[in-house]
Image (cartoon, helix red, strand yellow):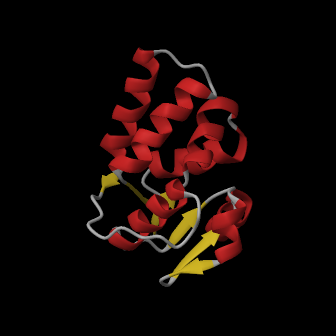
Amino acid sequence: MSRVVLDTNVFVSAYGFGGKPAEVLRGAIAGVYVLVTSPAILTELADKLYEVLGFDDEHVREVVSQLARIAEVVRPEVRLAVLADDPDNRVLECATEGGADVIVSGDHHLLDLGTHDGVRIVRVAEFLEGLS
């Protein structure tokens, strides 16, 4: 079964706007693949849910709790400095520590890498096409 890391922007889009990012998230909930995340990604997501989507405390707690239940939460021991944007490095760390097969992102810094340490980095649409 594939092991997948979702970048924070995919989570924000899924919870805020639905569409294809929500379809990716539903696949994780349904057990189509193993969702891998980390405390750093969950923390960044909580911040973005407040800032970008205007979620209240209760809604943020519900989202983070749900993800912690359905995902395998890894705690990377190695810090990476591959990209200038530190949160992007946290995604790479999670993928490496979690033995991910793919990172799903809309972030051009990550997408421009194409792969990292054998992990493919793809857009939401490309990920969904690969599932069918």
**Going 36% across and 67% down the picture, which residue do you hit?**
79
- Residue 90 pos. (x, y %): 44, 59
- Residue 26 pos. (x, y %): 54, 44
From the viewer's side, name the closer residue of 79 and 71. Answer: 79
**35 with respect to 86 (left or right):** left
The image shows residue 34, relative to residue 80, as above or below, that is above
In the rendered image, the quadrant that contains the N terminus is bottom left
**78 with respect to 124 (left or right):** left
**Going 72% across and 40% down the picture, which residue do you hit?**
19
In the rendered image, the quadrant that contains the C terminus is bottom right
Q: Is residue 85 visible?
A: yes
**Going 35% across and 45% down the picture, which residue do you hit?**
70
- Residue 41 pos. (x, y %): 43, 48
**Going 31% across and 70% down the picture, which residue do you hit?**
78
The image shows residue 63, relative to residue 57, as above or below, that is below
Q: Is residue 1 visible?
A: no
The image shows residue 93, relative to residue 53, as above or below, that is below
